Every structure is written in C-alpha cells, then in structure tokens.
C-alpha cells in the first residue's frame, strides 16, 4: 500500500525558507510517476505548487517559480520542497501527492501538514 | 491563467437525492483536462474523475462527470451519507493547474 507523509517545521519566520520533505512508502519513487506538492489555505483555496518527475525534471506553478525548488532523492525514497522568502500569504496546509499520469493530476495524497509563517 | 468557478458554494440535499455540481472555466480547457476531487473535513482531497468523465478505479459508479469546453458537471446519482463533503474541480491542461473554489454538499 503506497503512502505519502509530509514532514518539516510547522512554523517559519517571514523572509526565511520553508522546507518540507515527503517520504514515500510502499513504492519505489525512482520507478516512475510524477510527485507533486499542493497547498490549501482559506484565502487562496487549493493551489498546485509544482511537481518533479522520478528522473528529476521539474514543473513549477509560474506564480511561485522564482522562489521554488522541488527535488527528488531516490536513495531515500523521498522528494522535497523549498520555498524561499516566505510571507504570511504562504501559510497553508501543504500536501504531497503522486501523479501517475499528467504532472498536475494528483491521484494519491499525503495527510497534509500545516505550515504557519509568523515571527 | 484559467479561472474555474464553482457555484453555488453550498448545495443542500437529502440522502438518496441526485446532485449536480457545476464547474465553469474562464476559457476553453484543452482536451477536457478536468478533474474532480472530494474532500472531507480533516482529510486530503481524493481524486474521483479525470479527463472530465473517466471515473478513477475504486470510485462508485454513482459518480459521473461530463462536459467540454468551458462547462463541466459532476453528478452524484443517488447521495449516500458518506458523499456529503466538499467537491473541487481542477484543470490540468495549462501551466498553473488551477482549482475551483469548491462546492459543499450538505445534508
């Protein structure tokens, strides 16, 4: 049974970098598929952040591209998100997900983790 | 950026009734690349429909999707108690993969 679980700090200071990791169990991430990040807040709703292919190719939401890095570590069977220069507008529940077909079509999601940006 | 509008924000039904949810795009969605998700409180969204009308394996056949161009619909033929939730549409045919604001189906 494939499972995804997000981990990382729940509180980040404004102007700093938000870093999250998604650990995948029950499936070898290097085998196939895209792996994505999505966030959800009351203000903005659901927002696709970006995705990484198992080979390392990345696809980013243009609105976040300048601050965003998504990478994959096949040796640890995990992928990661880095978002720089965060503001309160980046406060959200962050989800990781698997996208087996198209890189924005998210078929299996993690449980989500709340990240608050505040001093 | 393609904007998806789901209205109304809330629909009220009784179990056993038929529910029809609307998703309207600000411009034509290429190849009907529209997905529908269900989200229950405290849970992540769950993919129900892809390609506007293809049910994901494991999703009950009371869920169906239709539409093309700018107008898409999710239909729940006969509401079960577990179907009361929030439903989101998403277009995955452009660079930003935008979601609609959601429709809450309540009892």
Image (tube, grey):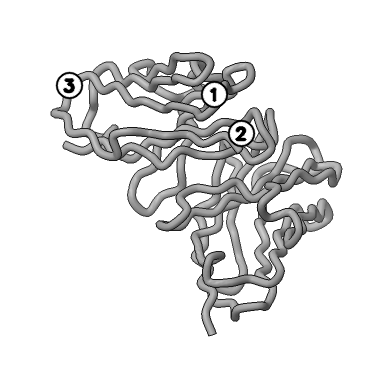
Task: Estimate the spatial distance between the alpha carbons at disc 3 and disc 2, rounded to whole Å.
Answer: 30 Å
Label 3 element class: loop
Depicted A55 relative to depicted B28: above or below: below
Residue A1 % position (x, y): 58, 40
Quadrant in which residue B33 is drawn:
top right
At 79% from the left edge and 46% from the top edge, which residue is drawn? A58
Depicted B40 relative to depicted B94: above or below: below
* Mark 2 neighbour class, 10 Å CA radius: few under 14, some 14 to 19, many 20 or more: many
Asked if one can make out residue A89 in the rendered structure from this viewpoint, the answer is yes
Q: Are marks 1 and 3 on the same chain?
A: yes
The label shown at residue A105 is: 2
At 65% from the left edge and 44% from the top edge, which residue is drawn? A26
In the shown orientation, is residue A117 left or right of residue B82? right
Of pointers 1 and 3, the one earlier in the residue sequence: 3
At 38% from the left edge and 36% from the top edge, which residue is drawn? B87
Residue B91 % position (x, y): 56, 31
* Mark 3 neighbour class, 10 Å CA radius: few under 14, some 14 to 19, many 20 or more: few
Numbered disc in front, either 1 or 3: 1
In the shown orientation, is residue B7 left or right of residue A59? left
In this orientation, which residue lies closer to the viewer: B46 or B72? Answer: B72
Residue A39 % position (x, y): 54, 54
Q: Are marks 3 and 2 on the same chain?
A: no
Label 2 element class: loop
Q: Which residue is mark 3?
A: B16
The label shown at residue B50 is: 1
Of all chains, the one bearing label 3 is B
């Amino acid at each position: 049974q494939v499972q995804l679980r997000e981990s990382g700090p729940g509180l980040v200071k404004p102007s700093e970098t938000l870093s999250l990791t998604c650990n995948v169990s029950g499936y070898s991430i290097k085998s196939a598929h895209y792996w994505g990040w999505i966030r959800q807040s009351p203000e903005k709703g659901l927002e696709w952040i970006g995705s990484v292919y198992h080979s390392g190719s990345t696809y980013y939401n243009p609105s976040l591209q300048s601050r965003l890095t998504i990478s994959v570590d096949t040796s640890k069977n995990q992928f990661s998100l880095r978002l720089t220069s965060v503001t309160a507008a980046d406060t959200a529940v962050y989800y990781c997900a698997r996208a087996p077909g198209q890189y924005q079509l998210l078929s299996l999601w993690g449980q989500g983790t709340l990240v608050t940006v505040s001093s | 950026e393609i904007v998806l509008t789901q209205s109304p924000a809330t629909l009220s039904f009784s179990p056993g009734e038929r529910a029809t949810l609307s998703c309207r795009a600000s411009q034509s969605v290429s190849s009907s690349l529209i997905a529908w998700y269900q989200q229950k409180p405290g849970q992540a969204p769950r993919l129900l429909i892809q390609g506007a009308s293809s049910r994901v394996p494991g999703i009950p056949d009371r869920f169906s999707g239709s539409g093309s161009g700018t107008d898409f619909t999710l239909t729940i033929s006969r509401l079960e108690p577990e179907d009361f939730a929030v439903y989101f549409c998403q277009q995955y045919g452009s660079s930003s993969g935008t979601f609609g604001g959601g429709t809450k189906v309540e009892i």
